[in-house]
Image: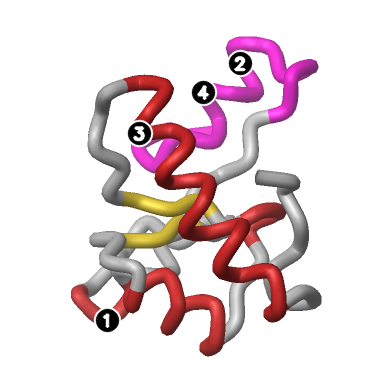
Amino acid sequence: MTHADLTLHHSSIDFEVQQSRLTLEEATGIKVETFAYPYGKVDDFVIGMVRDYGYLAGMGLGLNYEHTSYSLFNLSRIEIQSDYDLSTFAGLLPWSDH
């Protein structure tokens, strides 16, 4: 809802995690099943709450391309900046030889 760092604001988890889902589902008519942690920051409490709210997975930030069932609530994603050109973007892909 406000893109708060949830690791610093545990008291706002209900609003940030649950209300954002309800708002998105109402606006789009599409079921929201995954959660992207603001700034990619996460801790055990946040993971537990996202799981308890019924999400199927959660995305942080990182460069790890290998995931297991244990990492479903802390999947890595690479941040793409608006000033990246195609070559820079291509170099981030796991099959890239850059």
According to the picture, the residue beneath numbered tag 4 turns out to be 90
Q: Position of residue 97 (x, y in %)?
A: 45, 34
Residue pictured at 34% horizontal, 51% vertical: 34
The crowding category of the residue bearing disc 3, from other C-alpha atoms within 10 Å (few below 14, some 14 to 19, many at least 20), is: some
Secondary structure under the numbered disc 2 in the rendered image: helix
Sooner in the amino-acid sequence: mark 4 or mark 1: 1
Nearer the observer, disc 4 or disc 1? 1
Residue 72 image-quadrant placement: bottom left
Nearer the observer, disc 3 or disc 2? 3
Sooner in the amino-acid sequence: mark 3 or mark 2: 3
**Residue range of the region highlighted in magenta in the rendering:** 81-98
Secondary structure under the numbered disc 4 in the rendered image: helix
According to the picture, the residue beneath numbered tag 1 turns out to be 70
Q: Quadrant of the C terminus?
A: top right
According to the picture, the residue beneath numbered tag 2 turns out to be 87
Q: Position of residue 22 (x, y in %)?
A: 41, 43
The crowding category of the residue bearing disc 1, from other C-alpha atoms within 10 Å (few below 14, some 14 to 19, many at least 20), is: few
Structure colour scheme: secondary structure
Residue pictured at 55% horizontal, 87% vertical: 45
Nearer the observer, disc 3 or disc 1? 3
According to the picture, the residue beneath numbered tag 3 turns out to be 25
Confirm or deny contact between disc 4 and disc 2 (CB under 8 A).
yes
Secondary structure under the numbered disc 3 in the rendered image: helix
- Label 2 amino acid? Ser
Nearer the observer, disc 4 or disc 3? 3
